[in-house]
Image: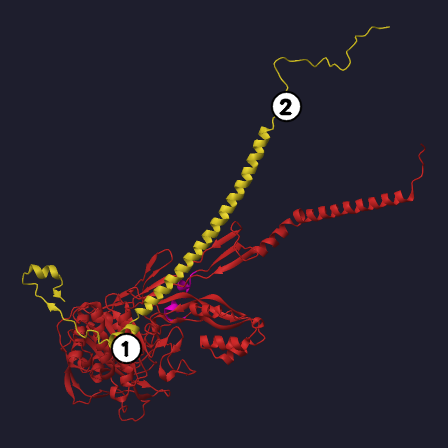
Chain colours: A yellow, B red
C-alpha cells in the first residue's frame, strides 16, 4: 500500500495570511457622492431649463413690448405728419389772420465800399 | 403515505387557465413590445415628423413697405398696422344685432352687411384695414363670430397734396400709380418667415425648434418735392380752375441747377387713401378716366405747346448764327400763306395758312420784337432760315419727342413725327403745332436755357435709403444743347416777353423773370381744331442766374381766359414767387 500525504480537509494550501492587510467592508460613500452629484446635476439641469424657459418667455414679452412701442412710435410719427400737413395748417392760419408773406425785403449792399460789418454779415452782398 | 398517480380534473383545469393567462400576458407584452419597436424604431422618423408638423407653425412675416419723404423729411407715405374685421357666419348667433352694431360703427350699410353675414359662406370680410382702436372697440363688444386679423395699411399724411407724386397702392398694398408703382420692387421689401413649435395653447415652446428669417423692410425714398411749395402750387392751380372754369391745371416746378422736381401738381386732385376723386363734378361718376382721377398730365399728357415752342426755334436760329437778336426781318405780315389758296379756303383740313394772334400792319420787325410779340409769321420766317432738318435736330436736342427719363410711371414721349411729303410741318412745328409735348418736357427744355445750355434729366427721387442705411443717389444725365452765349441771349429775350410782351402777368415782384406764353387750340374728336384752347406759360427766375423753372398748363379755360397770358401766367407768377421765397433766392431788384 502506497503512503499518501494527508491533507487537512478544507484547507487550501495556496491561501496564506498576509500580515499588515486588513479586510475592509466596501465603502458606500463614493456611491453616495456619485448619487448626490447625479441628483444635483438633475436638479441643476431642471433649474437651468426652467430659468431658460422663463428667460425665453421674458424675452418674448420684451419683443412684444418693443413691437408695441414701435407701432405706437409709428402712429405718433403719422400723427405728427398729419398735423404738419400744410393743407391742415393753412386754413387754421387763415382763420387766425396769418398770411404767407407776399414779398421779402432785402437790403442790397454795395460791397465795393469797404465795410467790415457788412462783410461779416453776408458774403453775397445781400442782407435780409 | 401513498401518492396517487392520477391528477384531479380541477387541478388540471386550473393549470390550463393559468397557462392561458400566462400566454395572453406574454402575447400582450410581445404585442406591446412589437408596437414599441415599431414606434420607436421602424416608424420613428415618420412619426417624429408628424409630431413636429403638428407643433410646427410657419408664419410669413410681411416686410414694412418703405416710406416716402419730401426733400425736408416730411412724410408723404408710410405703412401702419391696422385690423381687418371679418365674420364666420356659422358662428354668428345674432346676425341682425351684429349688422346694426358694426354697420353703425364702421359706416357700412347695415342691410348689406346683414345679407353678407347671413350668407352661406365660411368667411366674410366686414371691412378691411380698419383703424386699430376702432377695431378693438368692436371686438370688445364680444360679438360671437366676429374676428379681426392684422393687415398693413398705406397712409398718406399729406392727403391729396402730393397725390399726383406718390400715386397710390391697391387694397393689397401693391403700387398702382406714381412713385408707388415706379419703385414697387424697392418699396415692397422682401418677406421673411418664422418657423417655431407651439404648445397646445398656441404658445411658443421656448426651447423648441425655431427658424426665423427676418423680413427685409422696403427702401425709403427721399424725394425732391418740397411739400409746402407743392401745397401752394396746388392751391394756385385749384384757384385757377375756379376762376377760369378750366377742366384741369398742371404745373411743374424744376430746379435749374439740379434737375430736381420741386413740385408736380395737378388739379383736380384725388385722395390716395380712398382712391376717390375730390373733384365735385366727378363725385359718383363711374368713369374715373373721364374724370381724370389719376392720370398725371404733367408727365404723361401731351399737348401742342403753341408759342412756348418758339423758344427752341429762336435758340436754334441764334445758335446756328442764322439770325442775331437785332436782325431785322422785313415785311412781316399778320398772315402767311405757305400753300397757295390755304388762307382762302374755309376748310380746316387744308393746312399752310398761318396768322398772328393779334392783327397788325405789315412791318419790319427785329428778331427780338418777333419773339416778344409772339408773332407766328415772324417766327416762321426765322425758322425758314434753319430749314426743317436743323429745326428738328434742335427740337430733339431739347428733349422733345422722347421721354425725359424721369423716374415716374409711364412717361409719354410726345409726338415729333412729320408725315412724309408734309410741306408745312416744319412751319407748324416752329410755332408749336404738329408736335406734342408734355409739360415736363417743356419745363426741362426751358431749364436747359436757364442752365447755360445744359439739358438735365428731371428727377423726383433724390436718394434711396435701404434697411442697412445704404444710400443710392439719383444719377442725372446731362448734355449741352446750345452754347452758354445763346442761352444768355434767350434768357434776355424771355425777360423781354415778361417786361414788354405777352407775358406781363407772369412778373414777380422783386425779381426779374423770363418766360413765354403759349396758346394752342385743342383738337376735337373729328381731328379738327376747336375753339377750346390749352393755355400755358413756361418761365424762369431770377433771369440773370435762374434757379427755378415753372411750367403751367391750363386745359380748356373759358373764353375770357383762353390765352396763356391771361390764365397760365398769373398762376406761374404765384407759384414762382412762392418757389423763390421757399428757396431763399435774393430778389434782383425789379418791381412789377
Q: Nearer the viewer, residue A76 or B539?
A: A76
Q: Neighbour class for label 2 at 10 Å: few (<14), some, many (≥20)?
A: few
Residue B61 relative to residue B465: left or right: right
Q: Is residue B185 magenta?
A: yes
User: What is the magenta range?
Assistant: B176-189
Quarter of the image for residue B379 reads bottom left
Label 1: which secondary element: helix
User: Compared to B201, does A81 lie above or below?
Assistant: below
Quarter of the image where the N terminus of chain B is located: top right
Query: Given the image, what chain letter belongs to the residue carrying mark 2?
Result: A
Q: Residue lying farthest front?
A: B1
Q: Which residue in the protein does label 1 denote?
A: B235
Q: Nearer the viewer, residue B514 or B54?
A: B54
Label 2: which secondary element: loop
User: Compared to B360, does A97 lie above or below?
Assistant: above
Residue B467 at x, y percent in the picture? 38, 57
Q: Which residue in the protein does label 2 denote?
A: A25
In the picture, the disc for residue B385 is none
Residue B207 relative to residue B566: left or right: right
Q: Nearer the viewer, residue B162 or B28?
A: B28
Residue B554 at x, y percent in the picture? 29, 81
Amino acid at each position: 500500500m502506497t503512503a499518501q500525504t494527508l491533507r487537512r480537509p478544507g484547507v487550501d494550501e495556496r491561501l496564506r495570511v498576509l500580515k499588515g492587510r486588513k479586510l475592509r467592508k466596501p465603502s458606500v460613500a463614493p456611491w453616495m457622492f456619485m448619487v448626490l452629484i447625479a441628483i444635483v446635476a438633475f436638479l441643476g439641469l431642471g433649474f437651468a431649463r426652467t430659468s431658460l424657459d422663463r428667460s425665453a418667455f421674458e424675452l418674448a414679452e420684451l419683443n412684444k413690448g418693443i413691437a408695441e412701442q414701435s407701432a405706437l412710435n409709428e402712429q405718433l410719427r403719422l400723427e405728427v405728419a398729419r398735423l404738419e400737413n400744410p393743407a391742415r395748417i393753412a386754413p387754421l392760419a387763415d382763420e387766425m389772420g396769418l398770411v404767407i408773406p407776399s414779398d421779402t425785403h432785402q437790403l442790397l449792399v454795395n460791397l465795393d465800399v469797404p465795410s467790415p460789418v457788412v462783410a461779416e454779415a453776408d458774403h453775397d452782398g445781400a442782407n435780409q | 403515505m401513498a401518492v396517487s398517480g392520477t391528477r384531479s380534473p380541477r387541478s388540471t383545469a386550473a393549470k390550463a387557465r393559468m397557462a392561458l393567462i400566462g400566454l395572453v400576458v406574454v402575447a400582450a407584452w410581445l404585442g406591446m413590445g412589437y408596437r414599441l419597436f415599431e414606434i420607436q424604431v421602424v416608424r420613428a422618423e415618420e412619426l417624429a415628423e408628424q409630431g413636429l408638423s403638428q407643433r410646427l407653425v410657419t408664419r410669413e412675416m410681411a416686410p414694412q413697405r418703405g416710406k416716402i419723404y419730401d426733400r425736408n423729411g416730411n412724410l408723404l407715405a408710410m405703412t401702419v398696422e391696422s385690423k381687418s374685421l371679418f365674420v364666420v357666419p356659422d358662428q354668428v348667433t345674432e346676425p341682425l344685432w351684429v349688422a346694426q352694431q358694426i354697420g353703425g360703427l364702421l359706416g357700412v350699410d347695415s342691410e348689406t352687411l346683414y345679407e353678407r353675414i347671413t350668407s352661406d359662406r365660411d368667411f366674410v370680410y366686414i371691412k378691411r384695414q380698419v383703424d386699430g382702436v376702432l377695431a378693438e372697440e368692436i371686438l370688445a363688444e364680444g360679438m360671437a363670430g366676429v374676428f379681426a386679423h392684422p393687415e398693413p395699411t398705406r397712409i398718406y399724411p399729406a392727403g391729396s397734396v402730393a397725390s399726383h407724386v406718390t400715386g397710390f397702392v391697391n387694397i393689397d398694398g401693391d403700387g398702382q400709380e406714381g412713385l408707388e408703382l415706379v419703385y414697387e420692387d424697392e418699396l415692397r421689401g422682401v418677406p421673411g418667415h418664422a418657423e417655431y413649435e407651439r404648445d397646445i395653447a398656441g404658445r411658443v415652446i421656448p426651447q423648441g425648434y425655431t427658424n426665423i428669417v427676418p423680413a427685409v423692410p422696403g427702401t425709403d425714398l427721399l424725394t425732391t418735392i418740397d411739400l409746402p411749395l407743392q401745397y401752394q402750387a396746388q392751391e394756385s392751380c385749384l384757384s385757377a380752375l375756379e376762376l377760369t372754369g378750366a377742366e384741369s391745371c398742371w404745373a411743374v416746378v424744376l430746379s435749374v441747377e439740379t434737375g430736381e422736381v420741386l413740385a408736380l401738381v395737378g388739379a383736380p386732385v384725388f385722395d390716395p387713401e380712398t382712391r376717390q376723386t375730390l373733384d365735385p363734378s366727378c363725385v359718383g361718376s363711374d368713369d374715373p378716366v373721364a374724370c381724370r382721377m389719376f392720370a398725371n398730365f404733367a408727365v404723361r399728357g401731351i399737348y401742342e405747346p403753341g408759342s412756348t415752342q418758339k423758344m427752341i426755334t429762336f435758340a436754334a436760329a441764334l445758335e446756328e448764327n442764322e439770325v442775331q437778336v437785332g436782325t431785322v426781318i422785313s415785311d412781316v405780315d399778320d398772315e402767311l400763306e405757305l400753300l397757295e389758296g390755304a388762307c382762302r379756303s374755309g376748310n380746316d383740313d387744308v393746312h399752310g395758312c398761318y396768322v398772328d394772334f393779334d392783327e397788325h400792319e405789315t412791318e419790319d420787325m427785329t428778331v427780338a420784337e418777333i419773339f416778344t410779340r409772339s408773332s407766328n409769321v415772324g417766327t416762321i420766317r426765322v425758322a425758314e432760315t434753319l430749314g426743317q432738318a436743323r429745326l428738328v435736330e434742335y427740337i430733339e436736342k431739347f428733349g422733345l419727342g422722347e421721354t425725359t427719363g424721369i423716374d415716374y410711371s409711364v412717361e409719354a414721349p410726345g409726338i415729333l413725327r412729320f408725315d412724309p411729303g408734309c410741306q408745312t410741318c416744319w412751319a407748324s412745328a416752329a410755332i408749336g403745332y404738329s408736335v406734342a409735348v408734355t409739360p415736363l418736357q417743356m419745363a426741362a427744355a426751358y431749364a436747359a436755357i436757364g442752365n447755360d445750355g445744359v439739358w438735365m434729366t428731371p428727377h423726383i427721387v433724390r436718394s434711396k435709403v435701404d434697411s442697412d442705411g445704404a444710400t443710392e443717389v439719383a444719377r442725372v444725365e446731362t448734355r449741352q444743347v446750345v452754347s452758354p452765349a445763346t442761352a444768355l441771349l434767350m434768357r434776355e429775350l424771355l425777360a423781354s416777353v415778361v417786361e414788354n410782351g405777352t407775358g406781363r402777368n407772369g412778373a414777380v415782384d422783386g425779381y426779374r423773370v423770363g418766360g413765354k406764353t403759349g396758346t394752342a387750340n385743342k383738337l376735337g374728336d373729328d381731328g379738327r381744331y376747336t375753339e377750346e384752347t390749352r393755355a400755358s406759360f413756361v418761365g424762369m427766375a431770377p433771369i440773370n442766374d435762374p434757379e427755378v423753372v415753372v411750367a403751367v398748363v391750363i386745359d380748356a379755360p373759358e373764353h375770357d381766359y383762353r390765352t396763356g397770358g391771361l390764365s397760365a401766367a398769373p398762376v406761374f407768377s404765384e407759384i414762382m414767387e412762392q418757389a423763390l421765397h421757399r428757396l431763399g433766392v435774393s430778389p434782383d431788384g425789379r418791381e412789377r
